[in-house]
Image: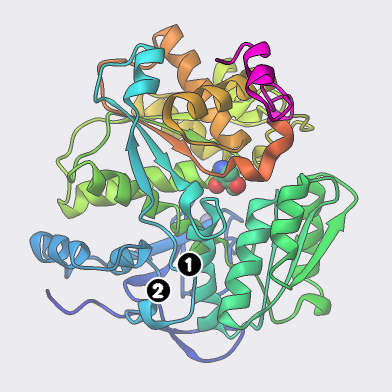
Amino acid sequence: MAVQTVASTTDSAAGTSVDLGPAAALSCRECGHRVPLGPVFACEECFGPLEIAYDFSAYDTEELRKRIEAGPANIWRYAPLLPVPADVATKPNLNPGWTKLVKADNLARELGVDAGKLFVKDDSGNPTHSFKDRVVAQALEAARAFGFTTLSCSSTGNLAGAVGAAAARAGFRSCVFIPHDLEQGKVVMAAVYGGELVGIEGNYDDVNRFCSELIGDPAGEGWGFVNVNLRPYYAEGSKTLAYEICEQLGWQLPDQIVVPIASGSQLTKIDKGLQELIKLGLVEDRPYKIFGAQAEGCSPVSTAYKAGHDVVRPQKPNTIAKSLAIGNPADGPYVLDIARRTGGAVEDVTDEQVVDAIKLLARTEGIFAETAGGVTVGVTRKLLESGALDPSLTTVVLNTGDGLKTLDAVAGTGLTATIRPSLDSFREAGLA
Ligand SMILES: *Cc1c(COP(=O)(O)O)cnc(C)c1O
Ligand SMILES: [Zn+2]
């Protein structure tokens, strides 16, 4: 393979040269203004969000494919397409990714999808049991490159755990912020890695606002907020979901993909990942549709989608799908663009439908999803019923987290019977 272009730049935090592999610059998604790689996230010209621009021009398609296939069974097999140094696999991190793509024929039968066409990408198999390990792994490399010593974030729960674990393994201090009323599973999972965990009296949007203030204050100096000042790097981690899905399908695009929406970052980067694979020639260029999934109790994007709006009006969240409870989603308008451009849609389901969908996935495929997975499976069912999803096409549904973190959602589930340890008692209970 041809030697990859290495971008070097001087960053403002540490004043050192950074090597983030094929990442060439930061580019504004609104006006295209470019700035050198650094811990910045908003355009100085128009305040638009910055994202990573790459130079992939040196890559030969077949050499790149071989290099990926020979790589480790984690996200670093895609290092040539990520903002990370070439030797990233040797650094202490959680090595997330390469999770299972499960052919879900039992679920397909229940939902009326053709046999062999429905897949669940099960990201509960990551080190801290949610997809967030993918994004944190990228932010961690940026934090190393920029000389930060504390890792932080505003979180709806899963991110706090992912940051705590990654910081512990990499030897960073961590201090993370969450709404004070999250599920116990999420709180314990975030606290157990030994970092500082701060509950904020307010919802996620309040937490996020607080973190933005902290970044501008001397108290936040030297802090890398993975989803705020390191957001351009963090966001790229979601591309690995798109890469893995295509590679696991035999280097093919799925026809339809159903993605949960919190801030909307993951959905936009899955689209970016698919586009990159097409441009690199790693998959055949043909149409695909991206569908977004929300809970009705926090559905600012699906509400805007259905109303035909380009802007997203903030909502006050009230849903059991707390990991998706972002009332003011930063990437909402971009999600609307992508759903409309690809011919997809954005839909929402009630909390009751979320619970039903969690149980449906569990009893058909043996996968216990957190509430966010209930949202995507529930929305998949609804979109099949409405005809928006085509049951004859290859469809991938994302499960982004583990049901053990949101046990309360299925709290009514439990013992079938309680019996004395005797065969008589067993027969009396009608179980023979
Ligand atoms: C964070 C999260 C998402 C999606 O987040 P975005 O902000 O939209 O990228 C999806 N599922 C789970 C379980 C999450 O924790
Ligand atoms: Zn701009």
Which residue: 37% across, 42% down?
A: 271
Quadrant containing the C terminus in the rendered view? top right
On the image, the x and y values in percent for residue 262 come to: 61, 40
Q: Is residue 103 visible?
A: yes
The colour scheme used here is rainbow
Helix, strand or loop: magenta stretch: loop
Identity, as a three-letter code, of the amino acid under mark 1: Gln
From the viewer's perspective, tell me whether residue 70 is left or right of residue 201: left
Residue range of the region highlighted in magenta in the rendering: 410-432
Task: Determine whether, in the image, residue 354 is placed left or right of residue 246.
Answer: right
For image coordinates 47% across by 41% down, the residue present is 267
Q: Residue at x 49, y 74 (%)?
A: 93
Examine the image and state in which quarter residue 341 appears: top left
The residue under label 2 is: 84
Q: Earlier in the sequence, mark 1 or mark 2?
A: 2
**What type is the residue that disc 2 sits on?**
Val
| 5 lies left or right of 315 | left
Estimate the x, y position of residue 183 in percent, counting from the top left: 76, 44
Residue 350 seen in this snapshot: no
Q: Residues within 10 Å of mark 2 (few under 14, many from 20)?
A: many
Q: Is residue 424 magenta?
A: yes
Q: Name the residue carrying label 1.
A: 138
Asked if the magenta segment contains residue 58, the reply would be no
Residue 226 image position (x, y, % from top left):
61, 65
In space, the residues marked 1 and 2 are separated at their CA atoms by 7 Å
- Quadrant of residue 353 within the rendered picture: top right
